[in-house]
Image (spheres, grey):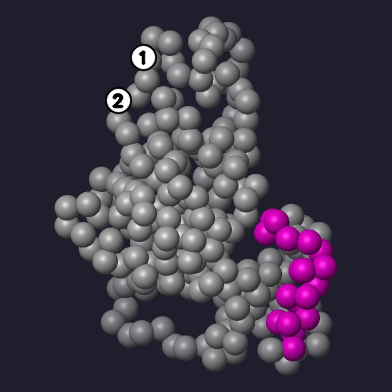
Amino acid sequence: MSDATERTESPEPERPVGEASTSAAQEPDPVQGEVSRRVRVVLVDDHRMFRTGVQAEIGQTARTGVDVVGEAADVDQAVSVITATRPEVVLLDVHLPGGGGVEVLRRCAPLAADAERPVRFLALSVSDAAEDVIGVIRGGARGYVTKTITGTDLVDSIFRVRDGDAVFSPRLAGFVLDAFASTDAPPVDEDLDRLTQREREVLRLIARGYAYKEVGKQLFISVKTVESHVSAVLRKLQLSNRHELTRWAAARRLV
């Protein structure tokens, strides 16, 4: 691996995690050498391109101390890989085929409860919806950060979760505080419960005014798949168009 060269220009601004870079800034510091701390991580996300970007951003162990020991794209794969590798931290997407991040947490609960070698979970998701945050935290995750986080901050969050801290993107912490400050369970929204996790994600972006193409880009799915999800949402909620959908979502504070 080549040494980093001395630079006099302004440093390159950090990118959201998942946007890989070949910049020399990712090389180990030739003065400090390799980092001494290490953490074993499993990456769970159903988008292969995103996993590749995260791996490129944080997986250079000599520089970051993060050793990505496994990856998974759905619930069954995640449980299998986590059980086999026993990582210290799992980066867990909220919306996964097979039941979502909450199902992974449920099935891996004995590993998380292991007093000697606990597996800790940090949610990493495009969603910043209160119900998603509260759901995975109640399921056992130690923190929740969104995919706009930089690589440097994500590495720091991984180590903090490994050490037992709770970590949240700034605005998300309020959701958790509000939820656990209340002694009353949140009311069940039967209409919302009819939707799959992916349909909720599409609903939220459409209600925020995203075009179908923009939704597809955000979720790494085709425009045709977006259209299919929107049609399913409208049918299940008995709505006629995206304007009614937006009003429906706004009334439930989903946007």
Q: Vertical placement of 153 versus 25: above or below?
A: below
The quarter of the displayed image where residue 211 is located? bottom right
The quarter of the displayed image where residue 237 is located? bottom right
Relative placement, left or right, of 174 versus 4 is left
Outermost residue to the left = 115
Distance from the alpha carbon under mark 2 to that under mark 1? 10 Å
Numbered tag placed on residue 36 in the rendering: 2
Asked if disc 2 and disc 1 are in contact, CB closer than 8 Å, the reply is: no
Q: Vertical placement of 145 versus 108: above or below?
A: above
Relative placement, left or right, of 154 versus 232 is left
Magenta stretch, overall SS: helix
- Taking depth in this image into account, of 44 and 216 the one nearest to the observer is 44
Residue that appears at 35% across and 24% down:
35
Residue that appears at 73% across and 60% down:
221
Amino acid type at image mark 2:
Ser
Q: Secondary structure at mark 1?
A: loop
Q: Position of residue 116 (x, y in %)?
A: 17, 53
Q: Vertical placement of 210 versus 251: above or below?
A: above
Residue 134 can be seen, yes or no: no
Q: Position of residue 119 (x, y in %)?
A: 30, 55
Q: Is 229 part of what is drawn in magenta? A: yes
- Taking depth in this image into account, of 114 and 15 the one nearest to the observer is 114
Q: Residues within 10 Å of mark 1 (few under 14, many from 20)?
A: few
Question: Which stretch appears magenta?
Answer: 218-235
Relative placement, left or right, of 6 versus 136 is right
- Taking depth in this image into account, of 112 and 208 the one nearest to the observer is 112
Give the residue at mark 1: 32
Q: Residues within 10 Å of mark 2 (few under 14, many from 20)?
A: few
Q: Vertical placement of 49 versus 66: above or below?
A: below
Q: Position of residue 87 (x, y in %)?
A: 34, 49
- Taking depth in this image into account, of 19 and 112 the one nearest to the observer is 112
Q: Secondary structure at mark 2?
A: loop
